[in-house]
Image (tube, helix red, strand yellow):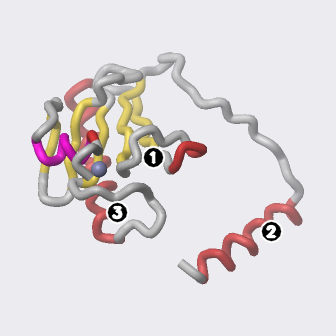
C-alpha cells in the first residue's frame, strides 16, 4: 500500500511527528488536530479497519492508546481524554488504515458529538441484542 499515507508514515518515508513506534504500532501527531495534543495510533502494517482485526494487533493498538492517554494526562495536564475509532466512510473513517484518535480534552472545550439519544422499549433492545448475538456466532 505504497500510496497509503499511514503506511508511508509507518515506513518513515513520509514526515510525521512521532510519539511512539514499535514493531506493531506507530503513534504520531494528527496534522489536523481538533485539540492540541491530538495523537493518532495506527497499525505499522496496512490493515483497513476493525472488522476481523487480529486480536494481538487489537491489543497492541489499545495498549498504546492507553499509554498515550495516560501521557496526555501527565504531560499535557488534560482534564480528560476521548478515544475514537471509525470504520468506513459511513462510520467517519477518512484514511482507510486502522487508527485510533487519542484526544486530550479540557473541561468546557466545546467538543462533542451529536448524540440524539432515544428510549426504545425493552422488547426492541432484546430483539436487537438477539440479532447481534447471532451475528457474533459467526465471527
Ligand atoms: Zn496503510
- In the image: residue 131, left or right of residue 47: right
Q: Earlier in the sequence, mark 3 or mark 2?
A: 3
Tag 2's secondary structure? helix
Check residue 126 in the rendering and tell me which mark sits there, or answer none.
2
Q: Main secondary structure of the magenta part?
A: helix
Tag 3's secondary structure? helix
* 117 relative to 38, above or below: below
Mark 3: few/some/many CA within 10 Å (<14, 14-19, 20+): some
Label 3–label 2 contact, CB within 8 A: no
Tag 1's secondary structure? loop
Residue 117: image location, x then y, percent: 75, 40
Q: Is residue 95 magenta?
A: no
The range drawn in magenta is 6-12
Residue 107: image location, x then y, percent: 47, 20
Of residues 62 and 75, the one nearer the viewer is 62
Q: Which residue is mark 1?
A: 85
Residue at (52, 49) in percent of width and height: 88
Residue at (12, 54) in percent of width and height: 22
Of residues 70 and 16, the one nearer the viewer is 16
Check residue 58 in the rendering and tell me which mark sits there, or answer none.
3
* 11 relative to 110, above or below: below
Mark 2: few/some/many CA within 10 Å (<14, 14-19, 20+): few
Amino acid at each position: 500500500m505504497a500510496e497509503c499515507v499511514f503506511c508511508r508514515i509507518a515506513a518513515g518515508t513520509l514526515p510525521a511527528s512521532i510519539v511512539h513506534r514499535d514493531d506493531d504500532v506507530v503513534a504520531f501527531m494528527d496534522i489536523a488536530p481538533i485539540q492540541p495534543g491530538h495523537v493518532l495510533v495506527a497499525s505499522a502494517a496496512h490493515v483497513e479497519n476493525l472488522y476481523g482485526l487480529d486480536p494481538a494487533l487489537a491489543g497492541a493498538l489499545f495498549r498504546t492508546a492507553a499509554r498515550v492517554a495516560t501521557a496526555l494526562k501527565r504531560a499535557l495536564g488534560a482534564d480528560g481524554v476521548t478515544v475514537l475509532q471509525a470504520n468506513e466512510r459511513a462510520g467517519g473513517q477518512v484514511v482507510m488504515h486502522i487508527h485510533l484518535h487519542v484526544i486530550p480534552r479540557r473541561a468546557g472545550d466545546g467538543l462533542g458529538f451529536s448524540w440524539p439519544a432515544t428510549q426504545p422499549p425493552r422488547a426492541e433492545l432484546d430483539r436487537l441484542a438477539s440479532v447481534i448475538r447471532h451475528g457474533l456466532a459467526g465471527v
